[in-house]
Amino acid sequence: MDLTIRADLDAIPAYAAGRTVPGSLKLASNEISLPPPPAVLAAIAEAAVSGNRYPDPGVTRLTARLAERHGIAAERIAVGCGSVLLCQQLTQIMCGDPGDEVVYAWRSFEAYPIVVRISNARTVPVPLDEEYRHDLKAMAAAITPRTRLVFLCSPNNPTGQAIRRDELCAFLDEVPPGVLVVLDEAYREFVTDPDVPDGLTLLEGRPNLVVTRTFSKAYRLAGLRVGYAVGAPPVIAALRKVYPAFSVNSLAQAAALAALDYVPELLATCAEVTQERVRVRDELLAMGFAVSETQANFVWLPLGELTTRFAEHCEREKVIVRPFTGDGVRVTVASADENEIFLAAARKFQSLSS
Ligand SMILES: *Cc1c(COP(=O)(O)O)cnc(C)c1O
């Protein structure tokens, strides 16, 4: 008999990562362009000495440190191999029956439809509104008795818009208690709008809410793969059950722990980025581009049919941006010098087009 691999896997789109092109500036993956601080590099090197040993499967020290930092019990925190894998674990703990549904905004983080399909559940994408924001009324209306989970991404990747307190709380009040809401706050450290709540402050009294955070962006550890989920103890206990054994490796654990000693320095870089994003957006608007508001470390240019042409032009100018064919381009806001290189490329695109 022939080998039969799950036929539904054919329908799963491959995750298209931002490309790295030698000699070009990469503004395609929302990373911070600085390396981790020297003390974090030293902690990684020290952990490598014990590379012959398995990592702590319970990620005990890092979990305890995060609990202390956020003033939250350790039983409410699950560390994972990046928040992407935590998203997969979250769908795994909620979805098991064919026909289970997962609601999320679209366009949003590309990992959501992938992890939903891997878990054999049905994707229920709900279009963003005309300002590229989550349409929470439409998302609430998309919830059915089959809905098991809702992903919210705030600020939203790739459009940059964040969900404000009033609309978020109204939505959370409307979601049935049997549906898990996952608030993905990968870009929380870049939020400056006071009307955008810190998801961790909303957990009290909401056992069906989980907040995810990552060390990949503000903490400069995208290559090391560490994220964490904060929620009610039963949800966290379930996440630990489906945790792929030893998936947060010992270098990653040591690096994240060491990075937590440098929070003020790391956040200072985020503050520079948030100042730069205002300048970058203003300059793009002045050049005649449409650019949505952003609370993240990237800008969204809804270029529609011009998307591919713009991305190819940038690549010729040695800047790698992230195109979403037919929709728009996401560009990471980096240091002032790097942003200048991108802005020059954008200016040239406009002058060639006019
Ligand atoms: C970058 C990003 C993450 C981070 O994922 P990791 O697996 O922790 O690197 C999570 N969610 C969104 C929306 C992102 O853009």
Image (spheres, helix red, strand yellow):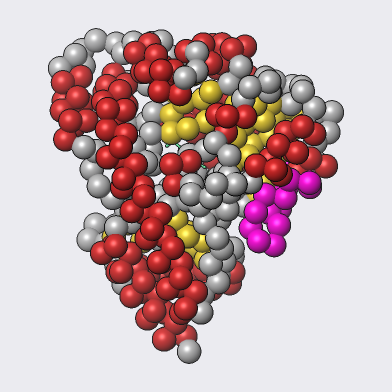
Coordinates of residue 317 in the picture (x, y in percent): 31, 72
For image coordinates 39% across by 14% down, the residue present is 64
Horizontal side of 167 relative to 118 (left or right) equals right
The image quadrant of residue 110 is top right
For image coordinates 48% across by 41% down, the residue present is 188
Coordinates of residue 318 in the picture (x, y in percent): 29, 67
Q: Residue furthest front?
A: 194
- Vertical relation: 260 (above or below) 56: below
Horizontal side of 220 relative to 41 (left or right) equals right
- Vertical relation: 27 (above or below) 256: below
Q: Quadrant location of the N terminus?
A: top right
The image quadrant of residue 203 is top right
Front in this rendered view, residue 16 or 261: 261
Q: Residue furthest bottom?
A: 354
Q: Is residue 44 visible?
A: yes
Coordinates of residue 281 in the picture (x, y in percent): 46, 67
First to last magenta residue range: 124-138
